[in-house]
Image: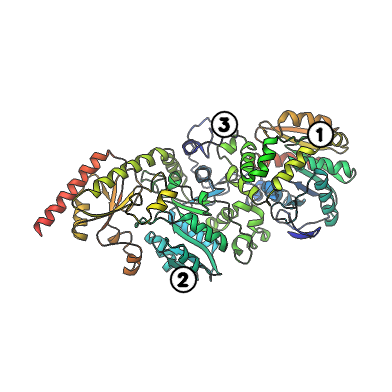
Amino acid sequence: MGENYKFDTLSLHAGHIPDKETGSRAVPIYQTTSYVFKNTQEAASLYNMEVGGHLYTRISNPTVAALEQRLAALEGGASAVACSSGMAAMHLVVSTICSSGDHIVASSKMYGANINLLQHTMPRFGINTDFVNPNDPDAIEKAIRPNTKMVFGEVIGNPGLDIMDVPAISEICKRKNVPLVLDATFNTPYLMQPFKYGANIVIHSLTKWLGGHGIAIGGAVVNGGNFDWGDKEKFPTISGPHFALNGISFWEEFGPSALIAKIRAEGMYNFGPSLSPTNAFYLMQGIETLPLRMKKHIENTHEMLDFLQNHEEVAWVKHPDLETHPDYKIAKRILPKGSGSIIVFGIKGGREAGQVFIESVQLASHLANVGDAKTLLIHPGSTTHSHLSSEAMKEGGLTDDMIRLSVGLEDINDIKKDFEKGFRAVKKLGARC
Amino acid sequence: MLINFKGAKTYIGTGGKNLDNSKTTICFIHGAGQNHLSFIQQSRFFANKGYSVIVPDMPGHGLSEGKPCKSIKEIAKWVYDLLKTLDVNNIIILGHSQGCLVALELNRLYPSFLNGVIFVAGSNEIPVNQFLLDLSLSDEQKASNMMVTWGHGIDGDMSINNWPGHSHYGEGNNVMKMNKPKSLNCDLNACNNYKDGIDAAKSINIPALAVLAKNDQMTPLKSGQKFVELIKKCETHVLDCGHFLQTERPKVLNSLILSYLLKL
């Protein structure tokens, strides 16, 4: 009681204590769609949100709830909701807070799908976004309008690895009474807990480092509980009357957890992006080793940075832990344990050389994911960010020769040997030319 | 709902239903540094079980404006005036922690006013150590965080919650942050200075319900057990949890309260 367990302990235990009936030490997989009500009164209580509990797995599930409570504990948040993917989490936040006619200020240097959702999909529903440089707090402040309902960005941008100055931007958001929503996938709560720096809402793709095994897609919204939604005119979906439940105000009824209560009552209920209990279990297995994995990820990343920087076939290397990175100082301040395990680099010889390299390595896998325990590679310009316009690519810092490396947990010498194989193939290409 | 009361904007939770003075009214009184959100899983539950529910945010707490009351007596008078203003009948008071002292004092000052009284994590006295009193002035946030941590049993430590996805600590800390600065110090001093609890407990002539917690570090079980012995007719239960029974064991607590109400 009153133990205030530390991060490593919470990674293993939060959200679950051994089952009193069966003694099950592991979190049981409640692979069920629904739950038998004890009586009609209990059923009514759950539908009315009078007490906590589960009524249908689209809304909540005991295994998924254990994951949600673990994430809330690890982030130091008030509450969380897990969902089918990181993009589902993003959509839940936008659709819960914003309505037609509302406006978002977002980073211009983000994951392609995040940009696509805000640039192309949401405008069809009357929600428009201005994209600004995430490293320019003044530009962010200037872009905020009276109808702006959130500022959105990635703590570590994908794939450009720009670092948002979260403390500075959160101060602006506080002054303007706008929630700061951050995609914290690349940092995970192990490297940085955004609520400590003033962010209000965090979204995760659990598929990446939190899961770490590349076997389950999942996402989550974690609510800091530190935003005042009380302005009914500005945030009518949270503090105004709800369309059901006798017209309650979620802010008045649920206070710090109003956002998550609303997401469950509307987003999960009406859109249904639920996470399967089995995937929740898999993701929790990953989280159990998150601290150990992140330490090794960072260790291997720093080794790879040295290796790539000193390699004659490499044209350039970018990572926020390098003094040459424009956000090095911000990274040192808010990501002291390390700025993640993604490295972007260019190979001498441009796009063609990059392609040869990717096709010549054996250990590193060429695929569209990051944060796996295994080393991964991709050419963003032709894959993850290929839907972006050339302007947006330029704005996002994407170059034609850029390779995104997600450093895994293999023996570092084996990764280096594997890369040498790729570089030898590139060299041969150069000789042919 | 928000009303203007004694010149200040005052928030009263009603469990999402309109007040209905023809029904029995349950008035929930929150503890030190808390507000109406202490009773998230009680207010809507009882409002949907045929009771009229009133969960006021005391002055300077939660969504209420005004200066925090400085003594238990002052809070009790404020609650009495509020209930009179709202013209409610057949009143049951439910206090949590400091709210129990308020319930005791309310019944002592206005002996025939209440029809029932429920003490959750209660005692006739809540002495507060000097360290916490000082900390609540010098670093209110740290004092709040410590109270939230001490106030929960293993469910708090392990982030176990019957409300899917909720964290006792994360939510508890932010509920306390909603209150006006220095309100916690006012509350803790009011608790520490209240000395009429024994007489007040002995003067209770209505049936009472007390629900105590085995692992309560704020109002220890021993103190609660001594307290209930002072009350002429008190049904007592002990639950296996920490100080915040309302969120740690809401279903059992609600069922005990409901069964008590049906017996009145």
Subunit ID for the residue under disc 1: B
Is B221 on the left or on the right of B88, as rendered?
left
Disc 1 with disc 3 on a shared chain? no
The amino acid sitting under disc 3 is Lys
**Rendered image: mark on residue B174:** none
Please provide percent x and percent y for residue B161: 59, 42
Please provide percent x and percent y for residue B62: 69, 52
Q: Badge 1: how crowded within 10 Å, few (<14), some, or many (20+)?
A: some
Q: Is residue A206 visible?
A: no
Reading the image, the residue beneath label 3 is A20
Q: Are marks 1 and 3 in contact (CB under 8 Å)?
A: no
Q: Nearer the viewer, residue A7 or A70?
A: A7
For the residues labelled 2 and 1, the Cα–Cα distance comes to: 62 Å
The amino acid sitting under disc 1 is Cys
Is A359 on the left or on the right of B70, as rendered?
left
The amino acid sitting under disc 2 is Arg
Image point (53%, 40%), residue name: A15
**Quadrant (top left, top right, bottom left, bottom right) of the C terminus of chain A:** bottom left
**Rendered image: mark on residue A124:** 2
Q: Is residue B67 visible?
A: yes
**Quadrant (top left, top right, bottom left, bottom right) of the N terminus of chain A:** top right
Please provide percent x and percent y for residue A116: 40, 64
Reading the image, the residue beneath label 1 is B234
For the residues labelled 1 and 3, the Cα–Cα distance comes to: 31 Å
Location of residue B143 by image quarter: top right
For the residues labelled 2 and 3, the Cα–Cα distance comes to: 50 Å
